[in-house]
Image: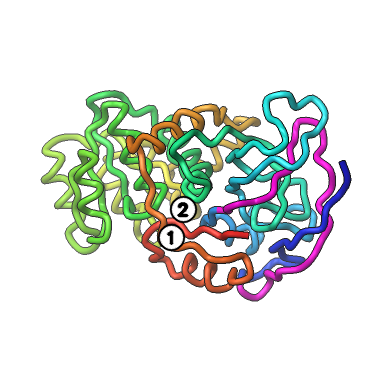
Amino acid sequence: MSAVQSRVLRFHEVGEPLDVLRLEEALVADPDAGRIRVRVVASGLNPADWELCRGFMPGTLPRGIGCDVAGTVDAVGPGVTDVRIGDLVFGTSDFASQPSAGAADVAIMDRWFAVPAGLDAVQAATLPMVLQTATWTLDLLDVQPGETLLVHGAGGMVGYAAVQVARRRGARVIATAGPTFAADLESFGASVTPYGDGMVERVRTIAAGPVHHVFDASRPNAGAIAALVEIAGAPERVVTISNHDEARAQGARVNVDELIAAGVLPSSDFLAEEAARTASGAFRLPVAATFPLEDWRDAAERSLSGTPHGKVVLLP
């Protein structure tokens, strides 16, 4: 094995993504023990990529973006025995310890799973972070069959996934969402109501009883947590993935705080089953648009708009 030249999308200083990101050439080293290197076929973008640029989870610079990856195995590190050169896999890039990540021609991966028959690489590259966030947060809430869960912001991809996972677990789900995906969410078995004025009263009417848990997957917006605590009746029943400061100030829960406090991230092994479900049509995430890597700026603008209407995927 030897290091390979690659285009990489990364930032050398912290700031707004469109200001600090640059597409440049760099060497991607051989994979370390427990890692693999892939020729990237697709890399799904997430809001977390933009927060990395702004200083979230600070690390050594330069840093790449693109946690979610699908690609063909190019090299395997010591101790790796479950894949061979040429296998098509999906999973997460080792963005925390590498100077590049999934938005590149070549990437180092720290978690991977075989792409099952019937699932294309683009769809596979949409799954990891969305499903990890949705599943791990539902686990923090400890939603039980028959309980009522409000998913606030179900038109975003984490909320969209959480509705499907929660329904599969037997929860009754109320979802707040705009019109774009309302029909989809209803088809999953959720009761859907719009955002905006009167939301608290509408949710209470639909619930006709207690709302046991609230999963806040909405975009950052002032006042969201207060309304959700009012619906739930207690701040500890509300977990947010986005409105961190407001949640902390009001005693609600922040998923990343609790995950970090645990000292080790939960298992991602469920991603193999979710990929199989996606291949069979039992789970889905909409793809808003795909862009060549060189058009990363257009992709970023679409994602940063706040209303991409699905996943945005880069194609190196």
- The answer to which image quadrant residue 53 occupies is bottom right
Q: Is residue 33 magenta?
A: yes
Name the disc covering residue 242, or none.
2
The residue positioned 32% from the left and 38% from the top of the image is 164
Q: CA distance from mark 1 to mark 2?
A: 6 Å
Of 50 and 182, the residue lying toward us: 182
Q: Position of residue 259 (x, y in %)?
A: 56, 36
Name the disc covering residue 220, or none.
1
Q: Is residue 284 left or right of residue 60?
A: left
Q: Is residue 284 left or right of residue 301?
A: left
| Residue 306 sits above or below residue 72 on the image | below
Callout 2, which amino acid?
Ser
Q: Main secondary structure of the magenta part?
A: strand
Q: How does the figure colour the protein chain or chains?
A: rainbow
The residue positioned 53% from the left and 68% from the top of the image is 299
Q: Find the magenta span and give its range.
A: 18-43
Q: Position of residue 211 (x, y in %)?
A: 23, 37
- The answer to which image quadrant residue 252 occupies is top left
